[in-house]
Amino acid sequence: MRRYRFFAALILSLGIGAPLEAAVHHITLRAVKLPSGQLAYEMVRHQVEDQGQVQDRTSHYAQGPTIPGPTLVLTEGDTAKVTLEHGIEGSDLPVSIHVHGVHYKFTSDGTTRTLSETIDSVAYPGKPYTYEWNAAPGTVGTWMYHDHAFGDPLVGAEDQGLFGTLIVNPKDGKVEAMIDGKIQKVDLKDIKREFILWMHETTFWGQELNHLVNRQIPLWTNPIVGARLGELVRFHVIGLGTAFHTFHLHGHRWIEPGTTHVVDTVNVGPISRTAFVVKAGEGVGPGDWHYHCHVVQHMQSGMMGKFRVVQ
């Protein structure tokens, strides 16, 4: 018993097995109605407690509501406390946030009592609701959050614009990619831009995370995205709605996550997703490189954009 206590004390003194320090994100979002009649989330506040210091990240987001909603970025181990305000004028129906991928208790499920038969984890006018998420080990990836309460029946209005992206980055800050023809670990600090592309019916909805200026930039529909030749760029492609798609980017190749398979086209179904890193213009040079859904009817309906690589 004494020997056990000695080794236990030694382990604790060395920090072995101790929980890693993690940040706590205090986020407030608001659900609103756009002049077009569509719905959207907007960022109200984002503050991060990390190692005894508080950092305000609110200015990193676009002002006003956007589709997709603000991209929330956590690091493996972080906790997020997300408060939702109901700002949809002319409606007293509940609205919510349901998140994929991370851990949470049932009180943070983002559903109504009608659906859960237990509680309303939703926001009402004048009555915000707070969710708590844990980006525990095993939750690294690109995930989605969306409403799961608004409308009639009370099952959600993601198809009206109430959706956004959650990215959980690995604790070591590295992801696998194929760069210069070799599969290697890439430091996320070396990635200059990230492009979020949601595939909804016959439209791409886009957003840029520009790490050069630390700003999120709404790109709206079927956007031109761009980078300088040789820059490392991470794409996040997510499906929404009822249609099944194939995402194809001209002139570039990448590896399927978790494999060594080299691809230039991936299947994307409703609420499925992929993320990958490319070196802009690798092996092909600058140009306006086409990206599109390879389902011909979707492409013919305008589901396409450009990846502009410049010198």
Image (tube, rainbow, N blue to C red):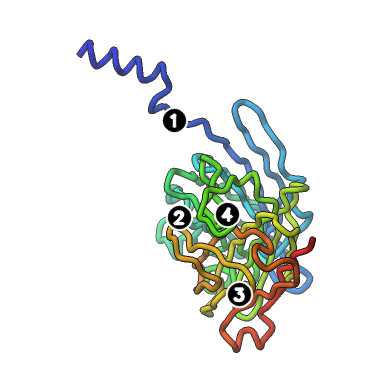
Mark 2 and mark 4 lie on one chain; the one further toward the N terminus is 2
User: What residue did someone put label 4 on?
Assistant: 166
Number of numbered discs on residues: 4
**Disc with the residue nearer the chain's start (4 vs 1):** 1
Q: Which mark is residue 19?
A: 1
Residue drawn 62% across the image and 57% down it = 234
- Residue 58 is at least partly visible in this image: yes
| Picture quarter with the N terminus | top left
Say if mark 2 contacts mark 4, CB within 8 Å: no
For label 3, the crowd category at 10 Å Cα-Cα, with few meaning under 14, some 14 to 19 and many 20 or more, is many
Residue at the spot of label 2: 119
Q: Amino acid at mark 2?
A: Ile
At 73% from the left edge and 59% from the top edge, which residue is drawn? 229
Q: Amino acid at mark 3?
A: His
Percent of width and height locating residue 160: 64, 72
**In front of the other: 75 or 280:** 280
Foreground label between 1 and 2: 1
Residue type (three-letter) at the residue carrying disc 1: Pro
Looking at the image, residue 286 sits to the left or right of residue 197; the answer is right
Residue at mark 3 to residue at mark 4: CA–CA distance: 17 Å
Q: Disc 3 designates what residue?
A: 200
SS of the residue under disc 2: loop
**How much space separates mark 1 and mark 2, taking CA atoms?**
32 Å
Report helix, strand or loop for mark 3.
strand
Label 1 Cα crowd, 10 Å radius (few <14 / some 14-19 / many 20+):
few
* First in residue order: circle 1 vs circle 3: 1
Question: Which x, y percent locates residue 146?
Answer: 57, 62
Q: CA distance from mark 1 to mark 3?
A: 40 Å
Is residue 80 shown above or below 118?
above
